[in-house]
Amino acid sequence: MSIPKEWLEFLREQYPPGSRIKLREMKDPYAPVPPGTMGTLDHIDDMGTFHMKWDNGRTLGLIIGEDSFSVLPPEATTMKLYMPLTADAYYYNEYGDMEDESYPLDGRELRAYEGAILKALINNRMPEESESGIMHWYDGNDSVEAKVKSVVFPVEEREGKLWGVAECRVVGTLTPEEMSTLKEYITGQASDGWGEGFEQREIDIGDGDMYVHLWNFSDDWDIRTEEECFGPKLAEGLPELCYSVHESTGELIVIKRGECGYHQTDYSTDDKERNVELADHLNEKLGVDMWQRQAMEVGSICGWDVPGADPAKYQEQESPQMGGMTLG
């Protein structure tokens, strides 16, 4: 028995692969999985059957309307926001006295003190922050508070620098508005709240003391996601997605900005020529021009930081090569 396409899309959206499921009752007459068994959803097929990987090793699927089960709240995942780290160091002079003049240290120089800084950050946490970190002080009473379960400040070395990190435990996905609100809150804590108290804590570095800043007045200071900070630098003018045709199979495919490879789509037909027409039509509806499409095709195969992933390259040449991707 088939189920409506809309209902199938709804099920797959509500229950993505990896969802944790607790079985209440299975109607299988022969060898049902015992009630109370936990499992992980592998996928939902076109008939609407939930293909499972049960924790007891079994793989018997679930059927909507027959079997009874509940989906547990999603588990929190870790999201990191990065910020430049700086410090002022004061050294002992030859007489053993602390000098009055400070010496600025940047992220590259601070790599040598990663352990000492991390220890100081941990020691600066208050007892009230044991469960949720600085989210204990958040008073927004909004969706950010509901989704972000904790935020703590560690440090991390990346690309030759030591960075300040806001390590967030998040349930679900933050909307752009929620991400902006969270960044604004963490910035306030790094500059005037938690971070202001931390930067007054002296850290012994052997031949002197230093004071570390999670925030500073520099125009270069910013708080960014891992992708924003270390991901490939995408060219301007790339759309969020576009349609193309797989050169080998002839199927209609979807390319998403910044992602390697491609996604399949239900719009695809068995006719390659028809799929070429569909790709052109759908791209036109999305406002994607030929230059953008070719740049997206190159980026998804060769990486988003190559010259071919920039639409401007083809606008200058005025001779784009269309007709589908060459994917192995």
Image (cartoon, helix red, strand yellow):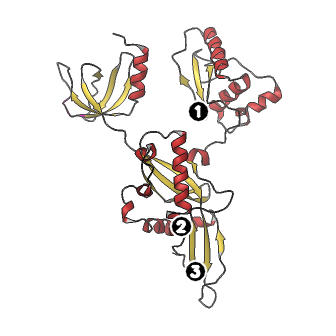
Q: Give SS at disc 2.
A: helix
Q: Position of residue 255 (x, y in %)?
A: 60, 26
User: Mark 2 is on which residue type?
Assistant: Glu
The residue to which callout 2 is attached is 196
Which residue occupies 29% across, 33% down? 39
Reading the image, the residue beneath label 1 is 260
Compared to residue 317, the image places residue 202 above or below, namely below
Q: Is residue 166 magenta?
A: no
Q: Residues within 10 Å of mark 3 (few under 14, many from 20)?
A: few
Residue 83 percent coordinates (x, y) = 58, 56
- Compared across the picture, whether 111 is left or right of 115 comes to right
Report, in whole angstroms, how far the alpha carbon at label 3 lies from the one at label 1.
48 Å
Marks 1 and 2, the one that precedes in the sequence: 2
Residue 50 position, x and y percent, is 33, 24
302 on left or right of 180: right
Towards the viewer: 198 or 146: 146
User: How far apart are the two marked residues, 1 and 2, measured between alpha carbons?
Assistant: 41 Å
- Magenta part of the chain: 33-37
> Mark 3 to mark 2: distance in Å?
24 Å
Left or right, 236 with reference to 164? right
Q: Given this view, does label 1 or label 2 mark the residue nearer the observer?
A: 2
